[in-house]
Amino acid sequence: MKNMLAWKQPNDRPLVAVHRGYQGGNILPNTVESVRAAIAVADIAEIDVSYADGQCYVFHDSEEAPMFGFLNDLEDLRADAIARLRYTNRYGCLTGHPVNTLDEILDAVGDGYVNIDRCWQSPAKAAAVVAAVKAHGMTRQALLKAPPQFAGLFPEDVAFMPIVSSTDELRQAEAARRLDAVEILFATPAAAEPILAYCKEKAYPTWVNTIVLNDTAVLSGGLDDAGGLFDPAAHWGRLYRMGFAILQTDFPADVLRYFGGK
């Protein structure tokens, strides 16, 4: 089966994916509003999925404390309890915004593109995400991703991207199923080169995370949003010149401004 993705690659810039949707102020991450904003401003909305009481919700695990002010795991709650939750916004103010379901988010994506993360932690969650993507007719718009050891959870009739740090991990994913793109994590730019060369040979589109999660995590060899805001050519531009087709960022407007717009 050929590559499932219907994502159109621009000729003169990378595709720009927005981490947890385009968020800020009273627009919460992983919500209908942030996804609509991501699609409007950039190319791809990246989202995270949790699974509770047989239902898929768009929420990043371990974020309960800043989002809701408690330490419980959302995935341990029943659907009626989740329906009563309301987010706290960037300013620490309680909002009226509930946790959105995956169905609500896929409706918001419309004919845009979406990348679905955190969908591999159980076979039940993976199956529920696949079912939702198929029910919405989005098998060529939605790209599911997971570490290579979980590649076998996802059938060939949905688009899939492994998260790898080596060519050995990439081959592990290839042994399980067809690949539609490859996300590469690397400590230095040199470490990415053999994986990029392999992907170029196989014609796999490559994805890089320019996001900065904290003071210690290195996702893209030091070529990231923190540097890109001040020297975009040396960070975002260099990643594109290295061969990355998709940049995931927390600053989509700044990335696109550097590359000349959407």
Image (cartoon, helix red, strand yellow):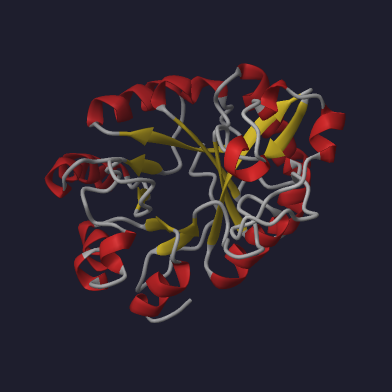
Look at the picture and state if 145 lies above or below 253: above
Residue at 73 percent of width and 53 percent of height: 94
Residue 89: percent from left, percent from top: 65, 56
Is residue 158 in sight in this rendering?
Answer: no
Please indicate whether residue 207 sits to the left or right of residue 80 in the image. Answer: left
Residue 39 at what x, y percent from top left? 61, 65
Q: Is residue 57 above or below residue 77?
A: below
**Quarter of the image where one finds residue 21:** bottom right
Viewer-proximal residue, 26 or 206?
26
What is the x, y in percent for residue 229? 31, 70
Residue 134 in view? yes
Q: Which residue is at 68% across, 53% downward?
A: 31
Quadrant housing residue 118: top right
Q: Residue furthest right?
A: 80
Q: Is residue 89 left or right of residue 169?
A: right
Residue occupying image coordinates x 34% and y 22%:
172
Please say if 148 is above or below 12: above
Tag count? 0
Residue 202 in the image, given as x and y percentages of width and height = 30, 42
Q: Is residue 154 above or below residue 36?
A: above
Residue lying at 64% horizontally and 26% vertically, measured from the top left: 73
Farthest-out residue, left: 190
Viewer-proximal residue, 166 or 18?
A: 18
Q: Nearer the viewer, residue 11 or 77?
A: 77
Location of residue 70 (image quadrant): top right
Camera-nearest residue between 172 and 236: 236
